[in-house]
Amino acid sequence: MENIQKKIGIIGGGQLGKMMILEAKKMGFYVTVLDPTEKCPAHCLVNEHIIADFDDKEAITLLAEKSDVVTYEFEHIDADTLTTLEEKGKKIYPTAKSLKVIQNKYTQNVLMRDNGLPVPEFCHIASLKDLQEAGKQYGYPFMLKTCTGGYDGKGNFCVGSAEEITEAYSALGEGRIPLMAERFFPFIMEISVLACRGVSGEIQIYPVAENIHQDSILSETRVPAHISAQTTQKAMDLAKRVMEIFEGVGMFCVEMFVDADGNVAVNEVAPRPHNSGHYTIEACVCSQFEQHIRAVTGLPLGSPELLQPVVMRNLLGEEGYQGKAVICGADKVLSIAGASLHIYGKEESKPKRKMGHITVIANKLEDAIKNAEKAKESIRILGEKKI
């Protein structure tokens, strides 16, 4: 069978799944998606939609039976079911083995530390006493994190003093969920590097992206990042090492911290296309979504070359509104030079829910930043009801 004729199964039909499918359809792939929401963003694009929960083992097995290769848009899924399918000869990318390690931040950090990658010092937390000891060892502030399930700042607590230890322990489940503590890394910038590995071991590394967060949610990505050439090379080398260590196939995103001296430490790894990589659709020769499809189906990888400086701004559901999504200001956004608008097609808007994004390209990064701010100020995504 030609690689281009393979049928693709995707677990998750949200915005990442949708953007993967848009690229898959350009190349004529047959795509089946599994998602519990009948009118999920990807629904209108797929050949088949299996409506089932993400932890439905029978549904995941059915997806695999309908597909030559299975991938996923997020990592909080049943890795054991995927392992069983791999043992039966099904192709799952990224592999269930790498997924299982990455799903747990503690095991993820252990693997990176043991392979010589720079990560903030960390330890397992099993009790309130352990947390108190972490405060003595690391000083304040330090980070308390859930080992599984966290995203967009959820599952993290910055412990600022000994007086906050009990509050932090309670906020993150009092030990009902596995916890870890991490020495605070004195970062001045958060960056990320996209990396992709093909089934034959070929690796492509994307430019370093500078990320700005608000309320622990990604707000803006700027590329190229405003760092030295030496720090840029460190970050790109780290991303390549991560791909080798995890033996990943498909797109990975390596999130990192940079300190005032240009030192780089890995924060965490996501085994999938990533929000901070949306800029690649307009600004790179091969987007992260096309690259992922190429990788998991065995096609040659494309070029990650950056064509122009670029800024991506997330569009979140407006505070104070909920219900059927109402988009205001799209015309103004699209009148701005270099601006592209992506609306994900989620039926319901909620405060701080990711509803879309804007990408602005320009000959100079300063112009892209200015126009992206103008575009962001021009659009609002509301819900039909005030709350």
Image (cartoon, grey):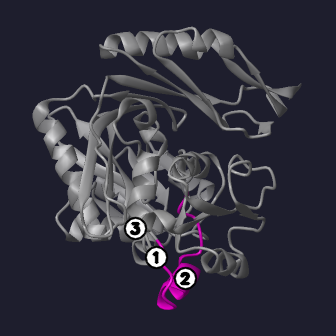
For residue 96, the mark is 1
Image quarter of the N terminus: bottom left
- Measured as percent of width and height from the top left, residue 190 is found at 34, 37
Q: Report whether 4 appears left or right of 155.
A: left
> Disc 3 marks which residue?
106
**Mark 1 vs 2, N-terminal side:** 2
State which region is magenta: 73-92
Q: Is label 1 in contact with label 2 (beta carbons under 8 Å)?
A: yes
> Disc 2 marks which residue?
80
Image quarter of the C terminus: top right
Q: Nearer the viewer, residue 125 or 96?
A: 96
**Mark 3 vs 1, N-terminal side:** 1
At a point 55% along the width and 13% down the height, the residue shown is 375
- Measured as percent of width and height from the top left, residue 77 is found at 59, 69
- Measured as percent of width and height from the top left, residue 24 is found at 53, 53
Q: Report whether 308 appears left or right of 124.
A: left
Alpha carbons under labels 3 and 1: distance apart: 17 Å
Q: Nearer the viewer, residue 64 or 221?
A: 64
Circle 2 sits in a helix, a strand or a loop, which is it? helix
Circle 3 sits in a helix, a strand or a loop, which is it? helix
Tell me if mark 3 has few (under 14), some (14-19) or many (20+) residues whose alpha carbon lies within 10 angstroms of its own: many
Q: Amino acid at mark 1?
A: Ala
Q: Amino acid at mark 3?
A: Tyr
Alpha carbons under labels 1 and 2: distance apart: 7 Å
Alpha carbons under labels 2 and 3: distance apart: 18 Å
